[in-house]
Image: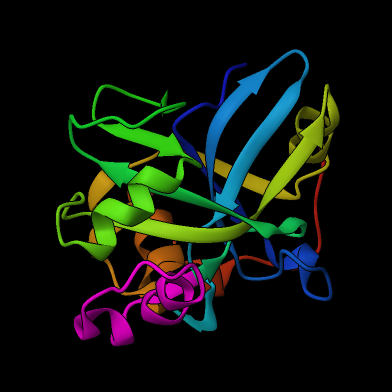
Amino acid sequence: MNLTNHFLLALPTLHQDYFAATLTYICEHSDDGAMGFVVNRPSDVSVLELLNELNLNPSRHWVDHPVIAGGPVSTDRGFMLFAGEDTYDSSLAVTDGVHLTSALESLRAVANDEGPERFMIALGYAGWQGGQLESEIARNVWLTVEADPTVLFDQPFDQRLDAAAGLLGIDLSLVSPEAGHS
């Protein structure tokens, strides 16, 4: 099972967990583990504030563009998920059209309005050790579906989880918080 470029949809069984009601995008998955970002949880920090803190002199239009709380691991590290063909130093191609980077030059490009049109900046990430994610899926913690860039970059944050559930043809509000096995 390789879940790179897939969404993890938190099932209601996670109601009191960090990942309750989250949509997580998996950027890398191998036998060694998995890495991804919660993509439906905006933080209280705007892109403008972050870029100002880094002394990058951004334009004010970033004030309404939030940084996302990407996950509970390394919350002081910044990452950028972006769509397009441009790449930056140390970019990881998740797919042909979606990339991940932690390079400062990507933030400099955003500050100068030369960056990609479709992007998210995240503080922190979600990580799993080898076999951990597979075990959680077997325990009915997550639903998975291949990611759709429209859901990832174009949907409002509060609609992303439902939009991803729609890719599976389900309504998460109708899913029981009790896991069942046959």
- The residue located at (16%, 55%) in the rendering is 117
The residue segment tinted magenta is 47-67
121 vs 40, nearest the viewer? 121
Quarter of the picture containing the C terminus is top right
Q: Report which quarter residue 146 is drawn in.
A: top left
The residue positioned 79% from the left and 36% from the top of the image is 128
| Residue nearest the observer in this picture, 51 or 91 | 51
Q: Position of residue 38 (x, y in %)?
A: 57, 58
Query: Please, is residue 3 above or below residue 60 in the view?
Result: above
Work out whether residue 174 or residue 46 is closer to the camera in this orientation and state it.
46
Q: Is residue 17 above or below residue 45?
A: above
Residue 106 is inside the magenta segment: no
Q: Position of residue 32 (x, y in %)?
A: 78, 17
Check the picture and name the quadrant holding the N terminus: top right
* Residue 72 placement, left or right of 88: right
Q: Is residue 105 left or right of residue 101?
A: left
x, y percent for residue 69: 59, 68
Q: Is residue 131 visible to the viewer in this orientation of the structure? A: yes
**Residue appearing at x 77%, y 74% in the figure:** 15
With respect to residue 77, does 44 lie above or below? below
